[in-house]
Amino acid sequence: MNFWLELILKLVAILGFVLTGALVVIYAELKAGSHMQSRIGPYYAGGRWGWAQPLADGLKFLQKEDLAPAAADRTVYGLAPYVVMMSTIAVFVVIPFGPDMVGRDLDLGIYFVLAVSSLSVLGILMAGWSSANKYSLMGGLRAAAQLIAYELPLVLVSAAVVIQAGTMSLNGIVASQAQTWFTVGGVDVSAPFLIKGQIIGFTIFMIASVAELSRIPFDMPIAESELTMGYLTEYSGIRFTMFFLGEYAAMISLSAIAATLYLGGYAVPGVSGNILNVIGPGVMLAKISLLVFIFIWIRWTWPRLREDQLQHLAWRWLIPISLANIAVISIFKVAF
Amino acid sequence: MTVSISEFFRETANWAFLVIAVPTLYAGWRTVTSNNIVRAVLYLVVSLGGTAALFFMLGAEFVGWTVVLVYIGAVIILFLIGIMITRAPLGVEADLSHDRSVKAPAALLSTVMFGVVTWALLDAFSNEAIAPFDSTSTTELGLLIFDRFVIPFEVVSFVLLAALIGGIALARMDSEAPE
């Protein structure tokens, strides 16, 4: 196929998936959150179950005026949402939904994911600084300190998976989980890394992911009671929508990465070949939905931590444990 | 053998090179001439991004993404946090500009550096055509670092260890200092 045509088709597919996915997750959060609090949630929009609520919200945001504070640094203020959005969407390039259903199976895979997702901190700091508002600046600083602290355990537990799989390519990681682990009575048994000794890694990955997403219980950067809305305070209209959609898209991307690293990705035991390109996306979507539901569940049932507790958790617990995790995984890798 | 200008522009890769290199150079220039410290850092981000893109063009994907992860994702963020925690004014800062006595040696030094690097590159490669190759595989790179270059690698890690210990010592100093 023509290179440029393929590029455009893949971009459209990824953008379409990310944006519709984000809307679906927003709706899921509205509904699931409501039911966890004994409410009904959106009910009228769209005629049934309020399914059109996220669309209506999105359109409402889009027609609002795009305001910027008089003292703001306009250029940086305008660019910040694009930086955050770009870093989130770029992750989807390497996420495999099937052996061939992948934007580009980079040799660097997970390394690429960690590199581009580290750019969102830059966008958040740009937003916080350029808003010319002390709440925004403090929110941006809190966000940056938090994202840096939790990126370390994320990188370290991913490194443990890379060691166990022997490759950084996400397709390779899925393939190594689909390999036969042992054979019982002539039946080949394969298991995802979650079962093959990465349960601690998975737990740390999920905790660090919640912190990377700045969701409750780690939502100090946008803590309403102290900082109004943190670095988002001054944003409105389409730029706020981009931050908002970006947050939910990041939820999907982190769930997809966790599903690939720990839950076996698109692999189905006993199935191989071209058929995986058809059922793989469905399997992957089911795993992503499960993890997204866990994120929503945590958000609506946990109280917010304090800023110092957050830093203690990362530096005193998660980072040492993930270092020990790497050591143990490496020993097992060499010994067996 | 020298390449004529028309020959240079006939090659698509050279256009791509210019599209990356010119903004990179401009951002580098603005990093040192910008009147606002945060903007200067943001121009540095563009400059580093261009450098990473040049590495991609050379097929050195791992090095390129390392520039993004380590320099943009960590070093620049630390710059920004450091600046914003102490002072982060918007708009033009008057005290950011130095007078001639500082500017002239800085310009001289950077010109000399540019000359030395250019000379070294020309001396090493001149106009020698390098055979096209696929992007470097990470496996080969890892084997090279941890096999042939393992001693330099360990030496570098000792420097980092020393820096870490120094950081801890500095951070602990004030609780024991008498003042």
Image (cartoon, helix red, strand yellow):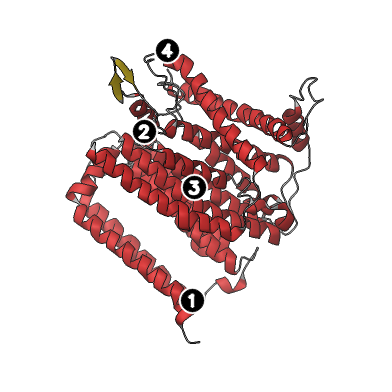
Chain containing the residue with disc 4: A
Mark 3 lies on a secondary structure that is loop
Residue extending farthest left: B148
In the displayed structure, would residue B151 be above or below residue A302? below
Q: Secondary structure at mark 1?
A: helix
The residue to which callout 1 is attached is B100
- Please provide percent x and percent y for residue A118: 49, 47
Question: Which label's residue is closer to the chain start, 3 or 2?
Answer: 3
Q: What chain is tagged by disc 2?
A: A
The residue to which callout 3 is attached is A118
Which chain is home to disc 3? A
In the rendered image, residues at marks 3 and 2 fall on the same chain? yes
Q: Nearer the viewer, mark 3 or mark 1?
A: 3
Quadrant of the frame with the C terminus of chain A: top left
Work out how far the residue at label 3 is from the one at label 4, CA to CA, in angstroms.
35 Å
Going 50% across and 54% down the picture, which residue do you hit?
A: A314
Q: Which residue is mark 2?
A: A196
Residue on which the image places disc 4: A275
Q: Is residue A230 left or right of residue A88?
A: right
CA gap, disc 1 and disc 4: 70 Å
Q: Quadrant of residue B138?
A: top left
Q: Residue furthest right?
A: A44
Percent from the top left, x then y, of residue B141?
A: 26, 43
Q: At label 4, which amino acid type do we have? A: Ile
Q: Residues within 10 Å of mark 4 (few under 14, many from 20)?
A: few
Q: Is residue B11 above or below residue B43?
A: above
x and y percentages locating residue A31 in the rendered image: 71, 30
Residue at the location (19% across, 56% down)? B151
Left or right: B123 with respect to A228?
Answer: left
